Image (cartoon, coloured by chain):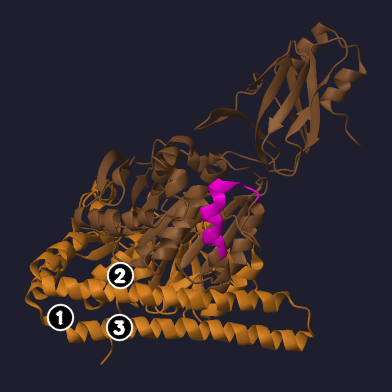
Amino acid sequence: MTKTPRPAVVLLGAQRFDPSLSAAVSELGVAGRIATITAGWQERESEDEELSAHLGDRTVNLRLHARGDELFREDPELRDAHRERQGSLRHRQDFYRIRLEHELEADRVIRSRAAPPEILAEQVQASLDGIRELDQWHLGLCARIRTEFETRWDLANRPAVMRHRREIAEILDGCEAIAIAGGHVATLINRLSVFGFADLVQHRTVFAWSAGAMAISDRVVLFHDSPPQGPGASEILDAGLGLIPGVVVLPEPEHRLHFDRKDRVQRLVRRFEPAICLALPARSRVTWRDGVFSSAHDVMQLRASGRAIPFAARSRKVTT
Amino acid sequence: MTTRLAIQKLLDGRTDPGRVQAFITGRMFPIVEGTSVTFVWVGHADTVQLRHWIYGLESSNALTRAPGTELWHLTLEIPSKSRVEYKYEIHRGGHSGWIEDPLNPNRARDPFGANSVLQSEGYEDPTWTNVDPIARPGLLEPFVFNSDLLGRRTGHLYLPARFRRSRQYPLLVVHDGSDYLKYAGMKTVLDNLIHRLEIPDVIVAFTDSPDRLREYANDERHARYLTEELVPDLARRFPLFDQPQGRCIMGASFGAVAAMSTAYRFPGFWGRLLVQSGSFAFTDIGTRNRRGPLFDRVVQFVNQYRAQPRAVSERVFVSCGVYESLIYENRSMVPLLSAAGMDVRFVESRDGHNWENWRDRLREGLSWLMPGPLMFIYE
């Protein structure tokens, strides 16, 4: 039996100014209703008039943020457990960050040392391996904490969760595509996970931008080369929905990445290999279908050489 | 090739009132030419002195009168990115007085009045210190608190824009709160940093003391007032994030000593500590210090801490101006704090012991101690 290929996934850059979403929707010939997820906007979730108008007023907002609040009001036991889990994840993130900063600092010092090339190459590789191992360990830890939480609290079978999931599924039945907006990526991941979107998105075309695009990747990487408190370290937040495996999504590169810092670009790429690092500036987009990229507009790929070059999407198969 | 300074060009020619007037007109003062800074005052006087607060330079420098004119001038080498507050001391007919520089519109206010400000080459007013019309303003309200330990206390409470009871907020307690608001523009700074996602939405208690030199100098009652009375009261009334990393205490000068000694008395409670130009006076032998009796209790406290340093907080941000006499004390604190097991960041600036110096370091300090959601939000 042939496996039905999942419909296309379109990754886009920021849509706040001069949006390009409707062009992507037209290109794929999506004519039906579109379910929107603006949970990343948190309390401003419902302020989606511009988005709706941009898509020709054929959207229905799934209200995942508000649903989350309703769910926790209806099920205080789950709310408390969820809050505790979030606290625990935050704690782990903090400790991971402490370790990571030390690993990155060691890597920086090693790279700046004068040594015979073969020794230097060996040591640089060893420090990179250490960082990769730490990233992987943290990612695994987050996944384990989430799985344990879902099992322990029987998430999928709690009446309030079931009711919301059923309502969402009914709305999605009448929709041809899902559009996932940017915003707060942790909030987005949480809402998508609580309402079981790993399954719900499988059979629909998905348009996702900024944090939305990060949230559907398999590894969410937080990044900023120049935050106010000093040079930033990119860090793994958690796993996303895993719709586009093997891709690290980097939105807003024009504000967050220093493409001229070859060493930083290089390290970022090598850290997450064999995944590819795609920078999505405003107005950029690329379509992914069954492991193959096409129709790339203004997307940049970060390369191990330390350069960022236009992403040649045609028939680009992703290695996972 | 050395470029002749503007003042030199004036002095090399004929100095009559007309040329002096032309020299003054349309020019910014003091004249900044690379690292050479020329201070100018025009008027009738017997002598004119530049009075500044740069530790390391003579506190009084005489201006020279240009022959046949009433133009007084002095050129100093000031490193780039410096900020120097100053006044002119005018002596005339047996009288003297300190005045702000009438040729320089740039002023900094403090509890004692105002000073003129020299901004040397490369210094820029941080954009985040100016009111941003796009940034939603938080709410600032005065509060009164009746402390069992200290009696009636006053201050201001800041709630971030979009405050919601359903959320949890970190708490920041600020010593000399009214001065931080008035002279460091801290409400504007908070509004902007929150708007830029550089710090989280935060509740801020701007506290004041009617007797700061006594209460801020390692007074146990003060530490207990903040930790055992004020914070629990705020926690009852507001949804505070009840973890050490959700509690930050800060202050400048004696206020920094108060922040440090409060954290010291309640180790682990205040997870974040921000100390600016702390008056951390100490002695290496004996107890007599060069700063006078006001510092006796501070010296006692700092000596005690230096003898037995311990971790009092998780993260400490220390800043100090290199033009302050306290730079030595602050530099001395940093390795101690680090060795005690705290995560320490130390920042020096080319500035003095003043409110705009403390204002200019707030972004770096607060965003390091309490990072905002910048790393999480991708619009």
Please state, as top left, top right, bottom left or bottom right, where the C terminus of chain A lies in the image.
Answer: bottom left
Which residue is more in the foreground, A273 or B183?
B183
Instruction: Locate residue B51: give its quadrant.
Output: top right
Chain letter, disc 3 residue: A
Residue A215 visible here: yes
Which residue is more in the foreground, B346 or B261?
B261
Left or right: B219, with A48 as reference point: right
Name which residue lies at 57% across and 70% down.
B307
Give the amino acid type for the residue marked by disc 1 in the picture: Ala
| Neighbours of disc 3 within 10 Å: few (<14), some (14-19), many (20+) | some
Pointers 3 and 2 within a single chain:
yes
Give the amino acid type for the residue marked by disc 2 in the picture: Ile
Which contiguous range is marked in magenta?
B290-303
Q: Identify the residue at the far bottom of this view.
A: A1
Chain letter, disc 2 residue: A
How far is mark 2 from mark 1, CA to CA?
16 Å
Residue A79 counted in the magenta span: no
Residue A257: where, in percent of width, then height? Answer: 55, 61
Residue that numbered label 3 is attached to: A145
Residue that numbered label 1 is attached to: A156
Please state, as top left, top right, bottom left or bottom right, where the N terminus of chain A lies in the image.
Answer: bottom left
Name which residue lies at 42% across and 73% down.
A94
Left or right: B18, with B269 as reference point: right
Residue that numbered label 2 is attached to: A189
